[in-house]
Image (cartoon, coloured by chain):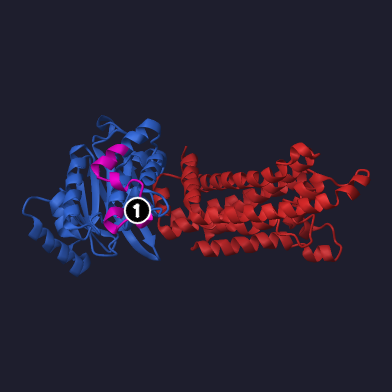
Chain colours: A red, B blue
Amino acid sequence: MSVIAVARLELRRLFVRPLTWVLAAFTLGELAWRFILLLGQFLANQIKLAALPGGPGYTDLVAVPMLSSLLTGGLLPFGLAELALVIVPLLTMSTLAGERSNGTLPLLFASGLSGSQIVLGKYLALLLWLALWLLLVLAMPLSLAHGTHLDWGKFAAASLGLLLMLAALAALGIACSAFASHPAIAATASLMLGLGLTIVNLGAQMAGVGNGAVNWLALSTHLEPLLRGLVSSVDLVWFALLIAFSLMLAIRRLSAEKERG
Amino acid sequence: MPNAVLPQDILEPDLLRLDRLSRHRAGRPAVQDLSLTLKRGQVLGLLGVNGAGKSTTLSMIAGALRPDSGTIALNGEDFLEHPERARRLIGWLPERAPQWPELTVGEHLDTHGRLRGLNGVALKQAREAIVERLELGPLQRRLAGVLSQGQRQRLGLACALVHKPALLVLDEPANALDPIQVAALRTLIREQVSAGTTVILSTHLLAEVTAVCDRVAILHEGRLHHDGPITDGDHKALEQTFFDIAMRGGDSTPSADRSRAA
């Protein structure tokens, strides 16, 4: 029950903060623009594409590229995955660092809550908000599903990949917030770590190296197969490990803070 | 407003027992070997100059800070072993009454009630009762971030009382209150005591202690230097003791043993 009480508190704080609404409005507007551009390209090339046997369809050219630029590149606005690298740190920055700067963290400690209950409650609230955000984004390509041939399996795999990415970034953001004295420091650290995880294998990729530890470490290595419709347990385990490691760090930091005061 | 979370008959006569409590903060001893017992229904005034260890002591009693050594027994149970049970028994108003600026007064009360184990109808009734008692009705939909200092203090008090605790821990509760609000606070404390609540009140105002407390403990440099009952007309004697301890430090250490309350 205590975890639920913390989650309700955090969810309420998220929903009454103007920043949350501004971020939601801006990102949904930007993604709607991306959707229209992708749809325009698809419609312009529809006759050529129809002539190709087994050629790419609505799922490959509109629905999945909505979610990430990993598969599209080009001059299109950012996809959801790229926006998440910025949005999630801004949402997570206040979770614990904000409590610390408000002086409200001792109130939570005094309520008999353990470090793990506080961290899990806050994580749960963030996941709910991010899942809602993802659902609103997915609603755009889904709105045309009745008039097109949507590859449901591929689309579900891509959506799962994005959900896992959001969950991992949220856990990373909470860990940064647990260590930071001020929300701005937490946001910066979380942004840098998220970007670092995304581009850590860029050099290896440019050198033509497709495997190895650096590639395994990169977020893109595990997101890309999911975006292509391939659900592999290795990728799922990588996301689970990142989430567990980040939350563990946050819990340990908070428990130590309760001890130290 | 009797205690609804735990009926009086299952509360121990010695509600709180601190045994050789010590705590370091910022590399120096903030509280050292502090032992005292608080009986049910007592009002203990914790006096001391700034940095005497009052807030550290209250933070440990409230469960926000773990002691380096020593034990805290609440209602006969080790506080650190049973934090879940302790949270229902204690209400805490920290110094400066920290709040979430983006939540309304009503949301604060709901949150504190839920964190202390109240839900559903019980939470609704508890919130309505404390809103009525502290006259927070017109402020219920106002954000905590826009409240005046006095209103924030009243909200902090309401949050500490919403679950009807058996032990009320107040850290400088009269801060930022005007004389009328101070008088109302004293009335509230007396009401709580007559309903069976035990109160610990930290302050550096002697008048506050003599007005509402029946016992006083004086801390200096983290140590207990005086612990005794307050009787009518004791203000001058208490003032003398306080200044002796504050000026001469450890000279009056033995008085803690001499005058320890039964």
Residue placed most toward the observer, A141 or B243 = A141
In the image, taking residue A237 as reference, residue A120 lies left or right, namely left
Please check the rendered image and state whether residue B141 is part of the magenta-colored stretch, yes or no.
yes
- The quarter of the rendered structure image containing the N terminus of chain B is top left
- B36 relative to A243 in the view: left or right: left
Horizontal relation, residue A63 to residue A107: left or right:
right
Q: Position of residue B258 (x, y in %)?
A: 15, 53
Query: In the image, residue A36 lies at what x, y percent?
Result: 72, 52
Q: Position of residue B123 (x, y in %)?
A: 36, 35
Query: To which residue does mark 1 refer?
Result: B59
The residue depicted at 31 percent of the width and 50 percent of the height is: B156
Q: Amino acid at mark 1?
A: Ser
Q: Chain of mark 1?
A: B
The quadrant holding residue A151 is: top right
Question: Which stretch did the figure color magenta?
Answer: B128-152
Instruction: Work out whether residue B143 can be spotted.
Output: yes
